[in-house]
Image: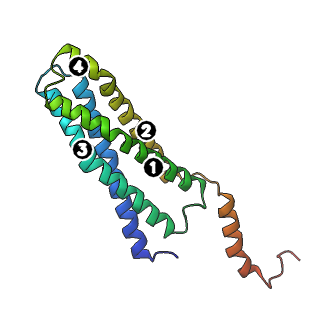
Amino acid sequence: MGLRSGGRKAALLAHVSTSVGWLGAVVVFLALAVAGLRSRDDAVVPACYVAMDLTARYAIVPLAAGALVTGLVSSLGTPWGLLRHWWVLAKFALIVVAGVVLLLQLTPIAALAKAAAGGELAGDSSAAQWSEVRLSLIVHAAGGLLVLLAAMVLAVYKPRGMTRYGYRRTAATARPAAVGRRPSGD
């Protein structure tokens, strides 16, 4: 079942929009994480972590879900398919892994935002207690950014290579047209 031209374009537009939005939101999250870790301003630090929590919950998670759903619609409604080409399968796997890691990070992000809003990051001893979490958020955001960039590279360059399923599917659709024909060159 394929989408018609207008449907394919609409699905692609939705997928590109949500994917680029996700990428941009992760860049903002990373900038806030770096600013929260490096700043010595007692007003900036809590603001960064509260903004990170809001960005993660109300921008990154919905955009990630949107990118996943629209990517599935696009892949299943076009000749690329979800399981036919290695690059589509790899891109899907990257996005699923990134989404799972994102969901696992929501709890530490919320805890850090709550601690920051409650003034628990103001003292040196309290800040040291949270330093591992603060650094982890930078590492995870940078890793997420790299994963999203890798998915973008796969989508643009579309490396060759079909899966076994893709070869079987292509052969199955090509056979009926070849029935009754004599091989060329005889």
Amino acid residing under circle 2: Leu
Quadrant (top left, top right, bottom left, bottom right) of the C terminus? bottom right
Residue underneath mark 2 = 146
Tell me: 181 left or right of 100.
Answer: right
Q: Do the residues labelled 4 and 1 touch (CB within 8 Å)?
A: no
Q: Do the residues labelled 1 and 3 touch (CB within 8 Å)?
A: no
Cα distance between the residues tagged 4 and 3: 22 Å
Q: Quadrant of residue 28?
A: top left
Whether residue 6 is situated above or below residue 163 in the rendered picture: below
Residue 78 point in image, percent of width and height: 51, 69
Residue 10 point in image, percent of width and height: 36, 69
Q: Which of marks 4 and 1 is nearer the N terminus?
A: 1
Amino acid residing under circle 3: Thr
- Residue in the image at 52% along x and 76% along y: 1
Which mark, residue 95?
Answer: 1
Which mark, residue 28?
Answer: none
Tell me: 89 left or right of 65.
Answer: right
Cα distance between the residues tagged 2 and 1: 11 Å
Residue underneath mark 3 = 55
- Using the rendered image of the protein, determine whether residue 179 is visible from the camera's viewpoint: yes
Cα distance between the residues tagged 1 and 3: 18 Å
Amino acid residing under circle 4: Ala
Whether residue 152 is situated above or below residue 122 in the rendered picture: below
Q: For the residue labelled by badge 4, is the local secondary structure a helix, a strand or a loop?
A: helix
- Using the rendered image of the protein, determine whether residue 32 is visible from the camera's viewpoint: no
Residue 9 point in image, percent of width and height: 40, 69
